[in-house]
Amino acid sequence: MAEGALMVIFGPPAVGKMTVGRAVCERSDFKLFLNHHTIEPLADVFGMGTPPFRALTGEFRRRVIEEAAAADVALILTMVWNLGGVEDARWVGELVAPYAAAHLPISFVELAADFDTRLERNRGEDRLLAKPSKRNLAWSDAHLHERENWLMNTDRAVSLPADEVLVAHRHLRIDNRHLAPEAAAEQIATWHAANH
């Protein structure tokens, strides 16, 4: 299903990017590169959100993607993306550029769920096991509330800076509020196969 492809799974915190990404990988040759693969070790060393943390998080993600594209790896990258930010859109465009330069397919899968659903998922056992920074539930819940001022899902009625990146690639939007991760992964697998 996935030889030499990049799939970016994006959406708000606790929407299910990791869980759905894992389910897609179980059905394919994709490898999962979570945003927290860089967040957790850097937060341990530098502290969450500090200037060195921010600089190295971006640098490490970019380098992993460069090497994955050069090695023809089928990669899933998860991220929270502020779709309303001009700089954020530029950064995501640059992040996927190594796959574009190698003429490898790029697709974006957007997950959406309401805030109450995400607040409940924020306390999920798998999430807390994989993401130590989320185990301080008071901080983690507050982080979800803070991020609500970002635009993290598309809206056909609203033009966003992210649109320029998304229209250049295949884009699937899934409301996974009432959808099991396996069902979402099946939708993604079917869509991906039909578009490659």
Image (tube, rainbow, N blue to C red):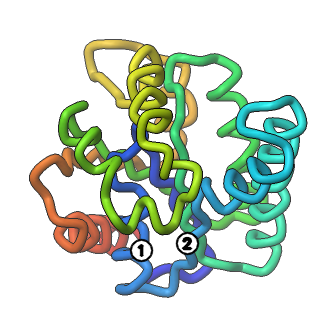
Q: Amino acid at mark 2?
A: Leu
Q: CA distance from mark 1 to mark 2?
A: 7 Å
Residue closest to the eye, 32 or 123? 123
Residue that extends furthest to the left in the rendered view of this protein:
178
Is 18 on the left or on the right of 194, as rendered?
right
Does residue 162 lie above or below 42 as drawn? above
Residue 72, percent from left and from top: 71, 79
Give the residue displayed 31% in from the left and 59% down from the top.
124
Q: In which quadrant of the rendered view does residue 138 lie?
A: top left
Residue closest to the eye, 128 or 5? 128
Q: In which quadrant of the rendered view does residue 184 lie?
A: bottom left
Does residue 175 lie above or below 156 as drawn? below
Which badge, 1 or 2, comes first in the chain's sequence? 1
Marking on residue 32: 2
Does residue 17 lie above or below 30 as drawn? above
**10 Å neighbourhood of mark 1: few (<14), some, or many (≥20)?**
many
- Where is mark 1, residue-wise? 22
Quadrant of the rendering where the C terminus is positioned: bottom left
Does residue 190 lie above or below 160 as drawn? below
Quadrant of the rendering where the N terminus is positioned: bottom left
Is mark 1 in CB contact (under 8 Å) with mark 2? yes
Label 1, secondary structure: give it: helix
Give the residue displayed 85% in from the left and 43% down from the top.
46
> Does residue 62 show up?
no
Residue 102, percent from left and from top: 76, 65
Is 140 on the left or on the right of 64, as rendered?
left
> Does residue 3 show up?
yes
